[in-house]
Image (tube, grey):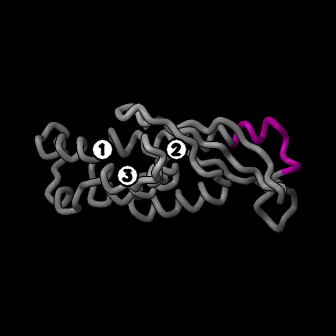
Amino acid sequence: LCVRILNSFLDNKNRTAFTIWAYDIEAGVEWYAPARYYADFRDLRSELIRLDKSISEIPFPSMGWAGFAGMTSDASDSASTKETRRSQLEYFLRRVFSGVYRGRLHPYLAEVAVHLQTFVGCDTVLSDDNDISLTLNNQVAISEATYCTRTPDASSEQERNARLHLKR
């Protein structure tokens, strides 16, 4: 899954929203995620860290003084500040996604994947006949029991099968 934050814009409450584009390379399907705010990214990160502590090591932008006592608003941030934040949030998303699909396996990987896929909107993707279909269950079909017997060896048949199911 390829994800990019294409731009940011101010909503009607002067909050910065981010436009996320996603592309499922294997399925050849692209879509735009629902508009996301910094708080959404922060909440996602908190939830993911609860599941996998190593995610806390991935750099994440701070809001600076804007997050304290309303000293400034998103509207007063400079263009370069907004672009830097956009770039840092994109880097965070891409690192987390790459960790899911290429990193070590652990007992909560399927749950991490569900949070990420929901965040970028893969749980509702338009099918060819324009009916909304829930594809999340097809994309993450891994039981936690599979991971409980996991070894650090990344070349096991069991791990390859788990990764194959995770990509679907």
Q: Position of residue 130 (x, y in %)?
A: 48, 46
Q: Earlier in the sequence, mark 3 or mark 1?
A: 3
Describe the element under mark 2 as helix, strand or loop: helix
Task: Give the SS element for disc 1.
Answer: loop
The quadrant of the rendering that contains the C terminus is: top left
Q: Which residue is mark 1?
A: 168
Q: Residue at x 40, y 56 (%)?
A: 134
Q: Which residue is denoted by mark 3 in the rendering?
A: 135
The one of 161 and 139 positioned closer to us in this rendering? 139
Q: Amino acid at mark 2?
A: Leu
Q: Looking at this view, is 62 or 10 the one in front?
A: 10
**The magenta segment:** 75-85
The x and y percentages for residue 144 are 23, 62
Task: Please report contact status of discs 2 and 1: CB closer than 8 Å, yes or no.
Answer: no
Lower sequence index among marks 3 and 2: 2
Between residue 110 and residue 130, name the one nearer to us.
Answer: 130
Q: Is residue 139 left or right of residue 53?
A: left
Name the residue rendered at 60%, 42% in the picture. Answer: 20
Q: Is residue 62 left or right of residue 102?
A: right
Give x and y (percent) for residue 128.
Answer: 43, 40
How much space separates mark 2 and mark 1, taking CA atoms? 19 Å
Circle 2 Cα neighbour tier, 10 Å, few/some/many (<14 / 14–19 / ≥20): many
